[in-house]
Image: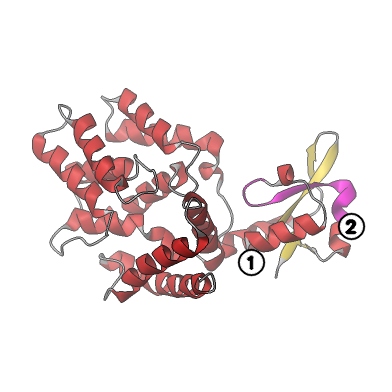
Amino acid sequence: MGILIDPPLWPAHGTYFSHLVSDISLNELHEFAKEQQLPPRAFDRDHYDVPLERFEQLVTAGARKVTANELVKALITSGLRIPAKYRPEKLNVILARRWAKTLPTEPGLGRSLLTLWAQEHRHYHDRVHLLSTLEAIDWLAKEQVNGQELMLLQLAAWFHDAVYEATAEDEAKSAILARERLNGILSEDAVSKVSQLVLLTAGHNPQQQDKLGRILCDADLEVLARPAPAYQRYAEAIYCEYSHYARSDLAKGRIKILGSLLEKPAIYNTQRGAERWEAAARSNLSAEIKLLETWL
């Protein structure tokens, strides 16, 4: 469809507002907004808030009028909608509740980890990624693991990008942090397993017999199979995190990583992950490689 706008029905600041979205890409939305001189501050993660007096002008400029329900459905279908639970004001509450169920005796550790995940330099490897990984574990591990195993998986998710500096040492440093912070809280074997799981997320190559490793790696890579516009949002966030590299170097490194995933017999290691995500992930990775090749 392209650019969509719903009726100005939402009261605020003495007027009524519409929502302006794209169901194709955020780039298209931002370009249209720039052409129409909408201020950047009007953007709210997946839409622009536009006042009543701009409605007809935007329609004339090409925005298609749809109902509020149609707009939401189109945004959800595109994969670009940001659910309320992923918004900053909700994330800490939801994640704190999850931590309390995972390791209720250690609320201070949970708060410390949340502080790391909320660091300003993170664009993709942030609290949304943490929650998405935990939710993917919920689905992949259902009826596959016992309570102790689920706790280890959840802790590995909490620690797997706890240290994130966009370097090749991040996973190793995160694994060391897991050992340091969990020592004396869990058994030595449990601490070792969490650390091993964290290290696996560097290359996503778990052994066939490593049930927990296969689940964690698949959960970490769930993002690769999202609808194309949502995948593009993820890729753009990755580019932001590696913006300290020259554009050509970033492209070369990213192509190498994506190519290594495509060379695998299967990107996903669990039956559930492969059945739901494999085809979409391969399509997304191939499309991104073609884009990156134009950067070289």
Where disc 2 sits, the SS reads helix
- Residue name at image x 30 percent, y 40 percent: 159
Q: Is residue 22 left or right of residue 242?
A: right
Q: Which residues are magenta?
A: 44-55
Residue tagged by mark 1?
Answer: 24
Give the colour scheme shown. Answer: secondary structure
- Visible in this render: residue 284? yes
- Visible in this render: residue 5? no
Residue 127 location in percent, x, y?
A: 44, 41
Instruction: Name which quarter of the figure residue 139 lies in.
Output: bottom left
Depth check: give the residue in front, 200 or 257: 257
First-in-chain label (1 vs 2): 1
Q: Residues within 10 Å of mark 1 (few under 14, many from 20)?
A: some
Depth check: give the residue in front, 148 or 240: 240
Depth check: give the residue in front, 67 or 120: 120
Q: Amino acid at mark 2?
A: Gln
Residue tagged by mark 2?
Answer: 57
